[in-house]
Amino acid sequence: MKAPTEVALELAQELGWRVFPANPKNKRPLIAEWPDKASNNPDEIKRLFSRWQNAMVAVPTGFTNGITVVDIDVREEKDGFQTIEELGLERLSIYPAVRTPSGGIHLYISTGTDHYQSSAGRLGLGIDIRSHGGYIIGAGSVSSKGAYEWMCDLQRVKNNTYPMI
């Protein structure tokens, strides 16, 4: 398992994403003004993560990194996978994905400067959209509940040119 700083540097260097540290217990930002302070500069990343050796790596969504993430949750009261099926959105599986500790999935969509609204449950039960003004926990992070893991190789994420469907 990689150290948080190493994970953050990899996401920044390989994908160009700006990142910031998040609390492994509750996913909240560990820095104030995270939208402005998230960075893809290696020296700044090392400085940001130096105070929190067990931090998770948060990735701003929307314009900041040119991505929108479909967050499919699985909990007792909601099954985002069932909602995806009911809505006929199985084709979302073309996007690079990260498995979350709860058994859900984050689907990464390259949206560039297109504006999409973040929402929780608006599309359907167990489906959240993380875009402008939002963030997600990046692959390689470890929370108190488990790890966030890529379900594909990093090259597929780099080559993700699929538009929002």
Image (spheres, grey):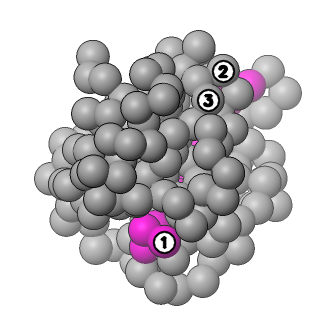
The image quarter in which residue 112 lies: bottom left
| Mark 3 surroundings: few (<14), some (14-19) or many (≥20) residues within 10 A | some
Foreground residue among 124 and 33: 33
- Tell me the residue at 38%/42% (across/down): 47
The image quarter in which residue 28 lies: top right
> Does 164 sit left or right of 4 as displayed?
right
Label 3–label 1 contact, CB within 8 A: no
Say which amino acid is labelled 2. Lys
The residue identified by callout 3 is 23
The residue identified by callout 1 is 64
The residue identified by callout 2 is 25
Q: Which residues are magenta?
A: 64-75
| Mark 2 surroundings: few (<14), some (14-19) or many (≥20) residues within 10 A | few
Of the image marks 3 and 1, the number of the one nearer the N terminus: 3
- Mark-to-mark CA distance, 2 and 1: 25 Å
> Does 40 sit left or right of 134 as displayed?
left
